[in-house]
Image (cartoon, coloured by chain):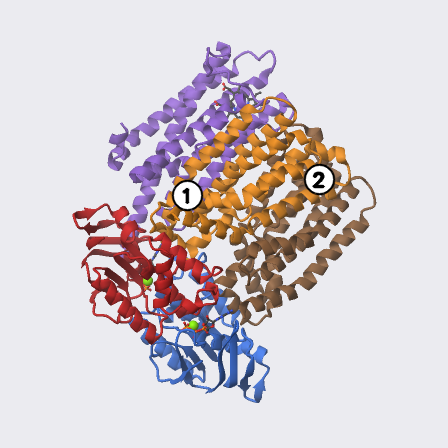
Chain colours: A red, B blue, C brown, D orange, E purple
Amino acid sequence: MISALKIEDLAIQRGERVLFRNFSLEIAAGEAVALIGANGAGKTSLLRAVAGFLRPIAGSLTFIGADGPLPADDARRAVCHMVGHQDGLKPGRRAREELIFQARWTGGDEPAALAAAARLGITRLLDLEVRVLSAGQRRRLALARIIASPRALWLLDEPLAPLDAASRALVGTLMTEHLDGGGMILAAVHDPLPIAVRTVEIVG
Amino acid sequence: MISALKIEDLAIQRGERVLFRNFSLEIAAGEAVALIGANGAGKTSLLRAVAGFLRPIAGSLTFIGADGPLPADDARRAVCHMVGHQDGLKPGRRAREELIFQARWTGGDEPAALAAAARLGITRLLDLEVRVLSAGQRRRLALARIIASPRALWLLDEPLAPLDAASRALVGTLMTEHLDGGGMILAAVHDPLPIAVRTVEIVG
Amino acid sequence: MTVLMVLIRRELSLAWARGGGALLAVGFFVAAAVMLPLSLGPAPARLAAVSAGVTWVVLSLASLLSLDRMFERDFDDGALDLLALGPLPLEVVAAVKCLAQWTVSGAPLSIAAPVVAVALGARPEAAPMIFVAAALGGLAFAFLGGTGAALALASRRGGVLIAVIVLPLLTPPVIFGGAAISNFADRLPWITAVSLLAAYALACVALTPFAMAGACRNAQS
Amino acid sequence: MTVLMVLIRRELSLAWARGGGALLAVGFFVAAAVMLPLSLGPAPARLAAVSAGVTWVVLSLASLLSLDRMFERDFDDGALDLLALGPLPLEVVAAVKCLAQWTVSGAPLSIAAPVVAVALGARPEAAPMIFVAAALGGLAFAFLGGTGAALALASRRGGVLIAVIVLPLLTPPVIFGGAAISNFADRLPWITAVSLLAAYALACVALTPFAMAGACRNAQS
Amino acid sequence: MFSALANPARFMAFSRWAAPILALVAAGLIGAGLWLGLNAPPDYQQGDTVKIMFIHVPAAWVAMMAFACLGGASFISLVFRHALADAAARAVAPLGAAFTGVALVTGSLWGRPMWGAWWVWGDARLVSVLVLFLLFLGYLALRASIDDEAKGARAAEILALVGLVNLPIIHYSVQWWNTLHQGESVMRAGGSALAPVYLTPLLLAGAGYSAAFGALWLARIRSEVWRRRATSLALRAALA
Ligand code: HEM
Ligand SMILES: Nc1ncnc2c1ncn2[C@@H]1O[C@H](COP(=O)(O)OP(=O)(O)OP(=O)(O)O)[C@@H](O)[C@H]1O
Ligand SMILES: Nc1ncnc2c1ncn2[C@@H]1O[C@H](COP(=O)(O)OP(=O)(O)OP(=O)(O)O)[C@@H](O)[C@H]1O
Ligand SMILES: [Mg+2]
Ligand SMILES: [Mg+2]
């Protein structure tokens, strides 16, 4: 469990282009940050840097635990949940297989996975192949995964886009619960989130 | 060019489940319809039925031209543009190759494709591989395609989700121009469109 | 440029990238040919006796490489939907895909085949027939492979299906081709075998596009 | 169930679906073996002389089938990102993927290989060595193929690259294996060749996971 | 010395005079080696064809050395993320391919009179050298096929490290298999099997080839560094 994420003077480059420089942000336990910015500003890139996929060209990313900074790579494997533009679900497999695998892989178990599915209202869909799910159902499946295993930091990339109004409200509730339990959320969004958040803009 | 699309008493089944029955809708030239409904209600399925991918179990779909109903399959090949959840862009190819091919395939040409790219502000990105584009840039590329070749009926599945505010306004303008030219739009959405539209809800 | 040309150009370039095109198939084939003497040990006489036949079999395997993905990518990323909304029917699209596959892998292979066979010790007189058999056979392999790939689209167990569906269909052209090559080399009558091979290939070209288009439509719905 | 077991089960089932698993590889292999005598014409002696070597080459090719997609799907659909955020390092994930690939195709192939070789006329005494060579070689092929597949991830020309990258690396095990089989059958000393093959396979198993993980991280960034 | 040269500015200063000096040394050594070699008496078995040795063998040595250099530079670049090491790796690959090509062609020319064949597929040494050539090409192809330069560099470095396994295989191929190719004769336990009339020019040519390789490599690294400076300047200009 971590108590804060500290981003200091971060600079990220993609290809030949520096997307942004001197980006600083601190997220404490129980806090949610909505990341906004134009298309191509670098929201996804920032999330990927936090998750450890991109190496920043300058600045630092620190995961702070109860006793100070943690080794970043270990911390990531223990605390990060990510739902990106690509959801990592295999079209040819059943929703149940995918959910249970992904829950277990991040430290959850089968009952937790089924409970998460129930929570998101997709129990009925679990025996379908992922390929036949509607866009919103599929996103709910991806979100069920992060409910199924408790990890402190949620990195979400436009999590609500394909969801209907009821599901958005539900995800709002789930986010609130996560924050109340000391979790953190960093979400890249174009539309406002259904919870109270601090908004941070990325400018190139 | 068609002057109206007429959907009468349509019923669609996916797998074992009938999604909806007795769905009727008429879209006239210059009109836009926003299709709303819960996740899994069948918005995408309806769009795919209009495009001819799904065969309805009951009811009829009629494309009406200047001199009455047209043979559906020929009409589709001549008037339908579709931007679905999957955008049909190949990650490994350059944006330019993809755009020009798709424009030509639907009856446009290279200058029109480049003009469309300029219109959507992605000229600078044309030499990049599709895989490195951000979600919003990629969606703009998919939309540039339908601007590049004039077809009367746009079938759009959540077209605005990954776009930033400026691009949404721009797409609103493009839609208005399309409608002013006698086009039609049928768009499945969860968030309101930036233009005045008739809203139709799908209920199972 | 007509829309057909546009499609052909695109499919050629995709086929090239997808399977590694010519280079992969030819590389695979040449590698196999190189490995053969390595794994047999250098005993030219043993090798020469079987070189034409072995070349032909390895060739048929090489031309199967990456066939299974002919439609899968387009299906998964939605490109097949866009193709279906274009001016040409899916039957034509499917045929163009198979021809593109043949052009980037079958054709170069059929040029490489006689060279490799002769390098392995086949009699040079057999070379023209190896070329003809490889070209015709490659056509049949591409269209049959495409059919298997399209049929497997809607299933969760694509690969298995392709094996079960395609391999039996591939056997006749392999037999005809092999007979044509060995008869030709042995100065026996070879016309029948070649005609059978050609007839089979043409039948594949003429008929399988309908099967492919139907299978694609079925998967899309 | 430990998380490693969870991963292994998933990768096995994906490998099975991806390449058609055992059925495709073995089917492909048996088909090739059946076609061989058909295309050579019935001349048992000619065939028998080369059967072990040919089997070995066809086997090495068959085990390359569908290797190229080992990482590509996971990369394209984002699953690789999720795997990277799990408890086990990517090196382990890569190794498990290759082992899964080997289990669904290499292992069944190495059981089929001696049977096929003997059916083609190889001396039954050679069978055990064919099995050993096929099993060890298959291991090397799976890990080297995976390395090529991972390296090609970031590129637009995946297939070609895999060929250019992997084929040279495959040559040594093919040579070692071929030598082991033919020496064993000829009652010549075979220990060196087998040890070299085993050493090469083990080196692949031990070292390439680092290359694969590095290549995946590089592509993800 | 390496840590000192790791600084690009210092490297550029050093290589500026080191490259031409090495080139001169190479010219001298190769000239001497070839002169001695071509004037050596014909071999009692091989006749005059033995003289191909003075081109073939050093080229083969340098080809292997080049791959070792490629592997070393790639390793440094991968582990220490040192830009100069990457430039060095990139610079050495085409050179290595060229030397390997020379070894293959001269070997093949030599093989025709000696073994009666240009090429023998069953020979492990020949094939493993061909594999070396293909690995160089693979390295270049991989680099070229990835648009993002940093990513391409990294992927190619990984490949170079994996390809290092081929080096011992080439070297020991003559021992592990019964090849047609010459066994170890120069550098083997128990002293060289070669007569001094041949050995001296061979060693001279070997040293000369190595110096030529060094000179070319330095020059190529220099131009690579210049190319990078130019692109980054152009980029800065474009962004400004
Ligand atoms: C295409 C054909 C050939 C290739 C690829 C080739 C390759 C090589 C290589 C890589 C080496 C260096 C081995 C090492 O230092 O570990 C070498 C050395 C040598 N080669 Fe060749 N060779 C070929 C043909 C020939 C022929 C035809 C001859 C003469 C009959 C020959 C004679 C030698 C000799 C005498 C050495 C020095 C051996 C030693 O001292 O280790 N090579 N060759
Ligand atoms: N390998 C690369 N080479 C060149 N440019 C790249 C590369 N990868 C990403 N980019 C560029 O980096 C920019 C940042 O992309 P990113 O996905 O982070 O944006 P984003 O803020 O998430 O946008 P969106 O709102 O559209 O999702 C884009 O302009 C993209 O084109
Ligand atoms: N082959 C199939 N078998 C069973 N059910 C299917 C099949 N294909 C689709 N469905 C179901 O059909 C329903 C309609 O899906 P559709 O994609 O049309 O919904 P949607 O209205 O677009 O939803 P969203 O807002 O989430 O995009 C979903 O519940 C889906 O699970
Ligand atoms: Mg984004
Ligand atoms: Mg939908």
Per the image, label 1 sits on a secondary structure element best described as helix
**Same chain for the residues under marks 1 and 2 in the image:** no
| Residue at x 55% of width, y 30% of height | D176
Q: Amino acid at mark 2?
A: Ala
- Would residue A17 be seen by someone viewing this image from the given angle? no
- Would residue E80 be seen by someone viewing this image from the given angle? yes
- Please state if E77 lies on the left or on the right of C57 as rendered: left
Q: Residue most toward the left?
A: A67
Residue D184 horizontal/vertical position (percent): 62, 26
Count residues near mark 2 (Cα–Cα under 10 Å), then give few for <14, some for 14-19, many for 20+: many
Residue D211 horizontal/vertical position (percent): 40, 40
Q: Note whether E115 is above or below D47 in the view shown.
A: above
| Chain containing the residue with disc 2 | C
Question: Does the closest atom of ligand 2 sit within 8 Å of the Cβ of label 1?
Answer: no
User: What mark, if any, has residue C52 been given in the picture?
Assistant: 2
| Chain containing the residue with disc 1 | D
Q: Note whether B169 is above or below A199 in the view shown.
A: below
- Please state if E152 lies on the left or on the right of E123 as rendered: left
Residue marked by disc 1: D212
- The residues bearing labels 1 and 2 have C-alpha atoms spaced at a distance of 38 Å
